[in-house]
Amino acid sequence: MARLGINAAGSDRADRFDDGEQWTFDWNIDTFFQGVNLGDFSTATETFSIQSDDWIDLSISPGSSEITFDATTGKLMFAAGDSSDDFTLDDLTGGSLLPVSAGTDIAISFSDTGGQNASLQSITVANPEPGTLVLGSLAATVLLAFRSRRRKRREAGIQ
């Protein structure tokens, strides 16, 4: 799991998102989006959104009342409220994984009709360990070889 600190957004202040500002990220490997920490996100006029095309048509039920999800656009919408600004995977999706394919953008946007600004403190992603990928591939290969051998034995009439 990687937690990426963000400290340079916004034109008015170097550490703030301004109204209408959007950042776009992508990774060069498949990963899973797991959380976001928003700072100074507290007024009723502010909204953050996080969108990825990989999330279109996913069935997601956010675990926080401050988050909604639009499956047609793959967008999570955050409305400022009274709870923490640190949203975990359980808050975002009720615990479901949010996959992001290599090279697919994640767009993070901020808007405010009240002239405020807010900060994006960090985002959290998880990358599958290379060893896990190797073990999974090995297990799939062994399973396929076993099934093939069993099928050939059955076709030959050997029990």
Image: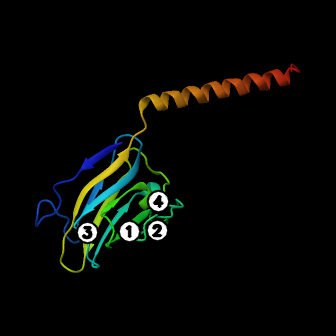
Q: Earlier in the sequence, mark 2 or mark 4?
A: 2
Classed neighbour count for the residue bearing mark 3: other residues with Cα under 10 Å, few (<14), some (14–19), many (≥20): many
Q: CA distance from mark 1 to mark 4?
A: 12 Å
Q: Which residue is mark 4?
A: 93
Q: Which residue is mark 2?
A: 70
Q: Position of residue 32 (x, y in %)?
A: 42, 47
Labels 1 & 2 near each other (Cβ < 8 A): yes
Quadrant location of the C terminus? top right
Classed neighbour count for the residue bearing mark 1: other residues with Cα under 10 Å, few (<14), some (14–19), many (≥20): many
Choose mark 1 or mark 4, whichever is in front.
Answer: 4
Label 2 SS: strand
**Residue at the (30%, 63%) spot, across then down:** 85
**Residue at the (48%, 55%) spot, across then down:** 95
Q: Which residue is mark 3?
A: 41
Labels 2 & 4 near each other (Cβ < 8 A): no
Q: Which residue is mark 1?
A: 77
Residue lying farthest to the right in this orientation: 157
Q: Earlier in the sequence, mark 1 or mark 4?
A: 1
Q: Earlier in the sequence, mark 1 or mark 2?
A: 2
Q: Amino acid at mark 4?
A: Thr
Q: CA distance from mark 2 to mark 3?
A: 21 Å
